Image: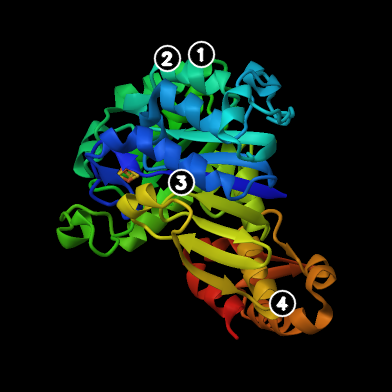
C-alpha cells in the first residue's frame, strides 16, 4: 500500500494556534504552485498509489480551475467511477488513463489506482461550486475543518468562519453526495466546558458525519497562542476530562475509537492515514511534505518561494533506517491504533526475529507496568494511558 499526499500551503489567515507550514496572503501563487506540484510529481512518474490526500493549509482555496489542473496533472481521471460517490466504503477503483491534454508535455505522469481520495476543506471555502468540482475530479472523502460549533471558541483562536458556516459546509458536502464526511474538532479551546463541547458533538453526530478527528489544543512554540495564552485556557486535567467525555460520548454513538485522535463509524476509517500508522510507504509533494519510500524517509524544505523556483530540488534531509529502527518505529505507530494494536508475529515476519526481540522485551516490560495490554501476540495501549502515551512511545523507540 502506498499513499500520495499533496500539501496546499495557503490560508486566508493564520489561526493563532497553528504551526503547520501554511502562508496567509499568498493566494496569487496558487496557479504557479499547481504547476510546481505537477512538475515535482513527474519526478515520480510510473509510481502508483492507493490513496490520495490533499491537505494543508487550505486545499479548498484552490478553486475549481486549479483543482482540475492539479488532478489532471497527477494523472487522475476527471470523470472516474469514484465521481459517483455513492460508495459508502469508498473502495471503487479509479483507473489511470493517459490524459490527452498532458501528452504535449512529453513527460510521464503518476499512475494511480486510488481506493480513497480525500480533500481537506475549510467551512468558508466549501462552496457548492467547489464541491461539484471535488466530486467531478473523483474525490470520495472530504474532511472539513469545523474545530468547534461555538462562535466564541472559534473567535478565540482566530478561526475565520462561524459555527453556522461550518454546519452549512457539512450539509453542502452531504448534499453534493459525499457519504464519507469527516470533521476536525479541537479539545481544550479557550473557555471550553463540557456543556459547550457536548453541544458541538451532539450537533455533528446529529448531522450524520461518519468520521471525527479530535485534537487537543497545544501551545506550539512561536505561535501567537503560545506567546500570549489566554487566562481561560482549560487546565491539563480539564482537557483530559473533556477528552474522556468525548471518547465516551462518541463510543456511545457507535463510533470506533480506532486511533488516538480518530473516531469512525465502521468502514469509514481513513485508509490513507491507516497506511501511515501501518508503517506503509507514502510520497509527500509540496513544501514541508514528508515521504517514506524505498526504506528512506525524506522531507521537502518548508519554503514556498524556493519550491516555486525549483520544485524537484527541495529535499531537505534523507534518513535511512536500519531494520531494527524500522521495526521499533512501526511498533510505535501501530500502538496508536487502539483497537487493532500491534501484532508482534506480523512484525517478526516482516523484520526478522533478530530485529524485533529488543522491542518486544521493551513492550513486555510496559505490560508488567500496566501501560500496555497483551493478548496472545497483540499489544495495545491501555485505555487509561491514551492521553499520556508520548512517554510510552518514546520507550518503544528507545535504542
Ligand atoms: S486554517 Fe488550518 S492550516 Fe490554516 S492557519 Fe488555520 S489551522 Fe493552520
Q: Which residue is mark 2?
A: 128
Q: Residue at x 68, y 63 (%)?
A: 294
- Residue that label 3 marks: 214
**Disc 1 and disc 3 in contact, CB within 8 angstroms:** no
The image position of residue 181, as x and y in percent, is 53, 29
Residue 4 rendering spot, x and y as whole percentages: 59, 45
Give the percent coordinates (x, y) of residue 289. 47, 54
Q: Which residue is mark 4?
A: 323
- Residue for badge 1: 175
Q: Which of the marked residues, 2 or 4, is nearer the chain's N terminus?
A: 2
Q: Residues within 10 Å of mark 4 (few under 14, many from 20)?
A: some
Disc 2 under 8 Å from ligand 1? The reply is no
269 relative to 64 in the view: left or right: right
Q: CA distance from mark 1 to mark 4?
A: 47 Å
Callout 1 environment at 10 Å: few (<14), some (14 to 19), or many (20+)? few
- Residue at horizontal 19%, vertical 55%? 224
Image quarter where ligand 1 lies: top left
**Which quadrant would residue 384 be assigned to in this image?**
bottom right
Residues tagged 2 and 1 counted as in contact (Cβ below 8 A): no
N-term mark: 1 or 3: 1
Amino acid at each position: 500500500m502506498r499513499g500520495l499526499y499533496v500539501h496546499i500551503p495557503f490560508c486566508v489567515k493564520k489561526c493563532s494556534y497553528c504551526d503547520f507550514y501554511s502562508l496567509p496572503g499568498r493566494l496569487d501563487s496558487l496557479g504557479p504552485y499547481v504547476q510546481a506540484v505537477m512538475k515535482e510529481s513527474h519526478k515520480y512518474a510510473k509510481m502508483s498509489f492507493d490513496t490520495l490526500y490533499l491537505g494543508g493549509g487550505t486545499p479548498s482555496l484552490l478553486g475549481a480551475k486549479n483543482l482540475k489542473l492539479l488532478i489532471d496533472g497527477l494523472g487522475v481521471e476527471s470523470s472516474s467511477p469514484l465521481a459517483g460517490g455513492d460508495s459508502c466504503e469508498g473502495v471503487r477503483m479509479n483507473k489511470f488513463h493517459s490524459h490527452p491534454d498532458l501528452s504535449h508535455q512529453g513527460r510521464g505522469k503518476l499512475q494511480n489506482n486510488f481506493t480513497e481520495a480525500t480533500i481537506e476543506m475549510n467551512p468558508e471555502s466549501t462552496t457548492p461550486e467547489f464541491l461539484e468540482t471535488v466530486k467531478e475530479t473523483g474525490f470520495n472523502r472530504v474532511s472539513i475543518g469545523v474545530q468547534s460549533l461555538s462562535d466564541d471558541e472559534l473567535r478565540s483562536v482566530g478561526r475565520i468562519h462561524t459555527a453556522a458556516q461550518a454546519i452549512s459546509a457539512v450539509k453542502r458536502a452531504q448534499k453534493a453526495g459525499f457519504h464519507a464526511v469527516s470533521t476536525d474538532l479541537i479539545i481544550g479551546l479557550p473557555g471550553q466546558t463540557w456543556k459547550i463541547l457536548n453541544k458541538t458533538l451532539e450537533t455533528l453526530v446529529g448531522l450524520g458525519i461518519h468520521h471525527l478527528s479530535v485534537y487537543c489544543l497545544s501551545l506550539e512554540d512561536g505561535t501567537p497562542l503560545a506567546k500570549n495564552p489566554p487566562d481561560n485556557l482549560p487546565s491539563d486535567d480539564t482537557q483530559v476530562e473533556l477528552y474522556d467525555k468525548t471518547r465516551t460520548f462518541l463510543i456511545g454513538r457507535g463510533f470506533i475509537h480506532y486511533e488516538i485522535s480518530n473516531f469512525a463509524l465502521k468502514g469509514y476509517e481513513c485508509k490513507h492515514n491507516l497506511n501511515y500508522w501501518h508503517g506503509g510507504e507514502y510520497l509527500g509533494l509540496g513544501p514541508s511534505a514528508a515521504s517514506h519510500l524505498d526504506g528512506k524517509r525524506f522531507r521537502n524544505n518548508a519554503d514556498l518561494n524556493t519550491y516555486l523556483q525549483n520544485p524537484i530540488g527541495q529535499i531537505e534531509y534523507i534518513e535511512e533506517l536500519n531494520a531494527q529502527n524500522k521495526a521499533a518505529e512501526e511498533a510505535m505507530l501501530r500502538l496508536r491504533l487502539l483497537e487493532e494494536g500491534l501484532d508482534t508475529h506480523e512484525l517478526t515476519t516482516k523484520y526478522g526475529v533478530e530485529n524485533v526481540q529488543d522491542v518486544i522485551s521493551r513492550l513486555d516490560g510496559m505490560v508488567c507496568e500496566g501501560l500496555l495490554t497483551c493478548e496472545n501476540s497483540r499489544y495495545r495501549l491501555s485505555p487509561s494511558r491514551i492521553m499520556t502515551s508520548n512517554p510510552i512511545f518514546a520507550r518503544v523507540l528507545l535504542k
